[in-house]
Image (cartoon, grey):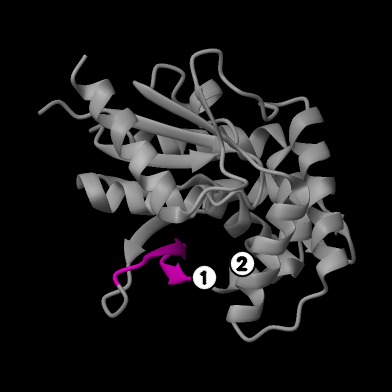
């Protein structure tokens, strides 16, 4: 059976990662979370005094970007994917709201995108992967055999993010999360480098009222159609 690249793009907190992970497990593909890579860069900046007090020292980050290596592994106990920043598991730390506020500004920097796209393309050389993000089908893998663009209402996405943080034992503020979602949408769609947009040949999936099971069924059906062509 031929192997393909599946690119899943869309707005923040659409559940892209959840559906991409489920699809990858179901069809035996590797899963890569490109958004986690930008989060990891933001965390690196925060840990090394490059990002602080709402500001990014762009020249310092430019000088450090070649030292930032992001890889993925699987937790032996939970079997869930984990993000490694220079070999260190940072999966939980990159998901905080503190890191989230810096993700879009970091992702808008051309030298950051260039460095991470190079790493992402290396991950896809053997195919048989599912990768989700903002520009996978438009910039990273424009020739991907299957492209999905995911959307949902901002209020729906904010509620999902709120519930996710609550489940982790945090005490989030819904209004702050909604504001962050709206701001990220604006930044992602208006940035000069690889703005968020639906590829012309991508399938649109509005999952506002879909269950996780329903999404997986839809994705598996589209995958089967693709490999049978």
Q: Tell me what residue is drawn at x 84 percent, y 47 percent.
A: 183
User: Which segment did they paint magenta?
Assistant: 79-90
Checking the image for residue 155, the label placed there is none
**Image spot of residue 70 (x, y percent):** 46, 54
**Image spot of residue 180 (x, y percent):** 81, 56
Q: Tell me what residue is drawn at x 66 percent, y 43 percent.
A: 152
Front disc: 1 or 2: 2
Q: Is residue 186 above or below residue 1?
A: below
Checking the image for residue 90, the label placed there is 1
**Image spot of residue 222 (x, y percent):** 33, 29
In the picture, measured across the screen, residue 26 lies left or right of residue 136, that is left
Q: Is residue 83 above or below residue 204?
A: below
Q: Is residue 69 in view?
A: no
Residue in front for this viewpoint, 183 or 107 = 183
Magenta span contains residue 84: yes
Dot 2 corresponds to which residue?
95
Q: Classify mark 2: residues with Cα within 10 Å, few (<14), some (14-19) or many (20+).
A: some
Pointer 1 and pointer 2: residues touching (CB < 8 Å)? no
Q: Is residue 23 above or below residue 221?
A: below
Image quarter in which the C terminus is found: top left
Label 2 residue SS? helix
Spatial CA span between label 1 and label 2: 9 Å
Residue in front for this viewpoint, 144 or 149 = 149
């Amino acid at each position: 059976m031929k192997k393909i690249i599946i690119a899943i793009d869309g707005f923040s907190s659409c559940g892209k990662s959840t559906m991409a992970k489920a699809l990858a497990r179901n069809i035996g593909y590797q899963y890569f979370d490109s958004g986690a890579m930008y989060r990891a860069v933001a965390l690196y900046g925060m840990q090394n005094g490059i990002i602080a007090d709402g500001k990014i020292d762009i020249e310092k980050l430019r000088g450090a970007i070649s030292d930032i290596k992001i890889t993925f592994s699987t937790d032996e106990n939970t079997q869930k994917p984990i993000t490694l920043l220079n070999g260190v598991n940072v999966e939980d730390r990159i998901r905080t709201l503190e890191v989230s506020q810096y993700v879009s500004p970091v992702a808008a920097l051309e030298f950051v995108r260039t460095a991470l796209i190079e790493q992402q393309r290396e991950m896809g050389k053997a195919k048989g992967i599912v990768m989700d993000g903002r520009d996978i089908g438009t910039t990273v893998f424009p020739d991907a055999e299957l492209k999905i663009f995911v959307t949902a209402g901002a209020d729906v996405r904010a509620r999902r993010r709120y519930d996710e943080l609550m489940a982790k034992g945090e005490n989030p503020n819904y209004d702050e999360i909604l504001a962050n979602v709206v701001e990220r949408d604006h930044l992602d769609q208006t940035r000069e480098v690889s703005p968020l947009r639906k590829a012309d040949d991508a399938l649109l999936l509005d999952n506002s009222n879909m269950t996780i099971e329903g999404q997986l069924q839809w994705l598996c059906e589209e995958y089967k159609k693709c490999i049978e062509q």
